[in-house]
Image (tube, rainbow, N blue to C red):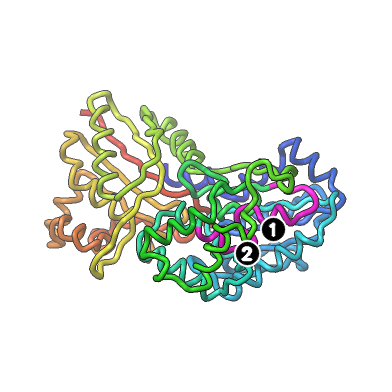
C-alpha cells in the first residue's frame, strides 16, 4: 500500500498527465516561446518528464534541486542548491530564473514546475537584505518553533522572487504545476508561492518576529526592511486582483490526497474495507498517533479494514535522540495497538523517503512490537519517546522503512491494517 501511494505521486507521471490536458497543450502551442523552470525536491523528475516529450520547442530549461538528473537536454541549466537554508548557489539559481522571466515577451509562456523545498532552493534577497540576513532570520525562526505559515510570511517579505513576485516580473503568461507538500494544498505556501497572490503583509511579518524572540533577536537589515514595508516605504507583495498576475494560472497536480488514493486502490484490491480520515493529520506526532488509534477503534469488529490518513505532524525535540516525526508517530501507536483487540499492522512514512535526520522514511509496528522489543532487551517505548530516540528503537527491531530518497514529497502517510476478530 505504501508502494502504491508513492507510485501515485511519482512526479514524472503527474507532469505527463498534466501536459496531456487539452487546455495546457493549447497554451503551450499558442505561445511565441516557452521557458520551463523546475524548483524543489521533485524538480529532477518533473523537469525530465516535461523536457523529454515536450509538445513544443523549449527556449530555456532551468532546474533547481540536488544533483542533475540524466536525460535533460544538454543546453539545460541545472543549479545544485541546498535545503533547508539557502546559500550562494540558491541565490545564483534565483537570479537566473528572475533574469529569464524579465527577458520574456508578452506572448511568451513560463512553465514553473514547483515542489516542496523551493523556498530555500531558489532565493533572491530583497533590496537592503543580505543572504546572511535571510539565513539568520530563517535559522532563528526554525529554532524558536515558528510554523511554516509564519516562516513563509517573513520569507516572502525578505525576497524579490517569492509571494507572486516571479510572475509579476513576467510580461507574458505563467503556468504553474505544483506538487503539494503543504497541508491544505495552499498554493501561496508551496515554495512560498512565487507565481500566485500573497495575502500576507509586512505588518504580519513583523508580528511573527515579535512572537518569536522579538525584533532585537534578528538582523538589523531584516527588521529595517519589514518596518519600512509596514510604513509603506516598500511596495507590498502582489495581492489578489493585481493586474500583473492576471495571466498567471496555477494547478496542484499531486498532493497527500493523491498518495492516499493510491494506497486506497491497493487496499481495496486486497479485500480491505477502506476508511479515510479526511482531516489532515497535524500536531504533535505522539498525540496524532493516539487520535489515529482512536479512529481505528470505531471500526473494529466490522471485518478486516484499512485506515488511511495524510498530513504532517511535528516533534518538539529535546535531548540528543535520533528519529523523525513518522518514527515517533509509529512508536506512539505501538503502545496502543493492544487496545484494538485484533491483529494490527501500522506504519507512518514521509513520502520523500527522509524522516528527520535519518536514512529511514518512517517505521512499521504490529501487534508483536512490544513483545519483540522486550525479548530483544530493547526496553519499553516510553523511554525512547521521552528521549525522542525512536530510530534506535526501530533499528534494533529491524522495523524501519527505508525507501531511499523518492524524488517526490507530499507530506506524510499513515496506514493502519486491522484483521478480523
Instruction: Indicate left or right for 351 with 389 as reference.
Output: right
Q: Nearer the viewer, residue 276 or 160?
A: 160
Instruction: Determine whether the residue tagged by mark 2 lies in a helix, strand or loop.
Output: strand
- Residue farthest to the top? 302
Q: Position of residue 133 (x, y in %)?
A: 51, 73
Instruction: Indicate left or right for 322 with 27 as reference.
Output: left
Labelled pair 2, 1 in contact (Cβ < 8 Å): yes
Q: Quadrant of the N terminus?
A: top left
Q: Is residue 265 visible?
A: yes
Q: Position of residue 70 (x, y in %)?
A: 66, 64
- What residue is pinned by disc 2? 64
**Nearer the N terminus, badge 2 or badge 1?**
1
- Which residue sits at x=38%, y=37%? 308
- Which residue sits at x=57%, y=60%? 229
Q: Is residue 4 visible?
A: no
- What residue is pinned by disc 1? 37
Instruction: Indicate left or right for 240 with 183 as reference.
Output: right
Q: Which residues are magenta?
A: 154-175
With respect to residue 174, does 386 lie above or below?
below
Please identify the quarter of the rendering in which residue 250 is found. top right
Q: Quadrant of the C terminus?
A: top left
Label 1 Cα crowd, 10 Å radius (few <14 / some 14-19 / many 20+): many
- Which residue sits at x=55%, y=51%? 190
User: From mark 2 to mark 1, how far is it between C-alphas?
Assistant: 8 Å
Q: Nearer the viewer, residue 365 or 149?
A: 149
- Which residue sits at x=42%, y=61%? 209
- Residue farthest to the front? 231
With respect to residue 198, does 299 lie above or below?
above
Instruction: Indicate left or right for 195 with 412 as reference.
Output: right
Label 2 Cα crowd, 10 Å radius (few <14 / some 14-19 / many 20+): many
Q: Position of residue 295 (x, y in %)?
A: 28, 33
Q: Does 394 appear in magenta?
A: no
Amino acid at each position: 500500500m505504501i508502494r502504491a501511494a508513492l507510485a501515485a505521486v511519482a512526479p514524472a507521471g503527474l507532469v505527463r498527465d498534466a501536459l496531456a490536458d487539452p487546455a495546457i497543450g493549447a497554451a503551450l502551442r499558442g505561445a511565441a516561446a516557452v521557458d520551463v523552470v523546475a524548483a524543489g525536491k521533485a524538480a529532477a523528475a518533473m523537469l525530465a518528464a516535461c523536457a523529454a516529450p515536450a509538445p513544443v520547442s523549449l527556449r530555456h530549461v532551468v532546474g533547481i534541486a540536488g544533483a542533475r538528473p540524466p536525460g535533460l537536454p544538454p543546453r539545460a541549466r541545472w543549479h545544485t542548491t541546498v535545503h533547508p537554508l539557502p546559500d550562494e548557489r540558491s541565490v545564483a539559481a534565483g537570479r537566473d530564473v528572475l533574469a529569464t522571466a524579465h527577458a520574456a515577451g508578452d506572448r511568451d509562456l513560463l512553465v514553473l514546475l514547483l515542489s516542496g523545498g523551493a523556498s530555500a532552493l531558489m532565493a533572491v534577497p530583497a533590496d537592503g537584505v543580505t543572504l546572511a540576513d535571510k539565513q539568520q532570520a530563517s535559522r532563528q525562526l526554525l529554532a524558536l518553533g515558528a510554523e511554516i505559515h509564519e516562516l513563509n510570511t517573513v520569507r516572502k517579505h525578505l525576497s524579490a522572487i517569492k509571494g507572486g513576485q516571479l510572475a509579476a516580473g513576467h510580461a507574458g503568461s505563467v503556468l504553474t504545476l505544483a506538487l503539494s507538500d503543504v497541508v491544505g494544498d495552499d498554493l501561496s505556501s508551496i515554495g512560498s508561492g512565487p507565481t500566485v497572490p500573497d495575502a500576507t503583509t509586512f505588518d504580519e511579518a513583523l508580528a511573527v518576529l515579535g512572537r518569536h524572540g522579538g525584533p532585537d533577536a534578528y538582523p538589523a537589515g531584516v527588521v529595517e526592511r519589514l518596518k519600512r514595508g509596514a510604513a509603506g516605504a516598500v511596495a507590498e507583495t502582489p495581492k489578489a486582483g493585481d493586474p500583473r498576475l492576471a495571466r498567471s494560472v496555477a494547478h496542484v497536480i499531486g498532493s497527500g490526497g493523491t498518495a492516499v488514493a493510491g494506497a486506497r486502490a491497493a487496499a481495496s484490491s486486497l479485500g480491505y474495507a477502506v476508511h479515510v480520515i479526511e482531516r489532515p493529520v497535524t500536531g504533535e506526532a505522539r498525540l496524532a498517533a493516539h487520535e489515529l488509534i482512536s479512529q481505528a477503534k470505531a471500526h473494529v469488529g466490522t471485518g478486516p479494514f484499512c485506515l488511511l490518513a495524510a498530513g504532517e505532524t511535528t516533534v518538539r525535540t529535546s535531548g540528543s535522540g535520533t528519529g523523525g516525526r513518522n518514527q515517533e508517530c509509529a512508536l506512539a501507536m505501538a503502545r496502543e495497538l493492544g487496545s484494538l483487540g485484533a491483529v494490527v499492522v501500522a506504519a507512518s512514512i514521509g513520502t520523500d523517503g527522509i524522516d528527520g535526520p535519518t536514512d529511514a522514511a518512517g517505521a512499521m509496528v504490529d501487534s508483536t512490537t512490544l513483545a519483540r522489543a522486550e525479548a530483544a532487551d530493547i526496553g519499553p517505548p516510553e523511554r525512547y519517546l521521552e528521549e525522542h530516540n525512536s530510530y534506535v528503537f526501530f533499528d534494533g527491531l529491524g522495523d524501519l522503512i527505508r525507501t531511499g530518497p523518492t524524488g517526490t514529497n507530499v507530506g506524510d502517510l499513515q496506514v493502519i491494517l486491522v484483521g478480523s476478530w
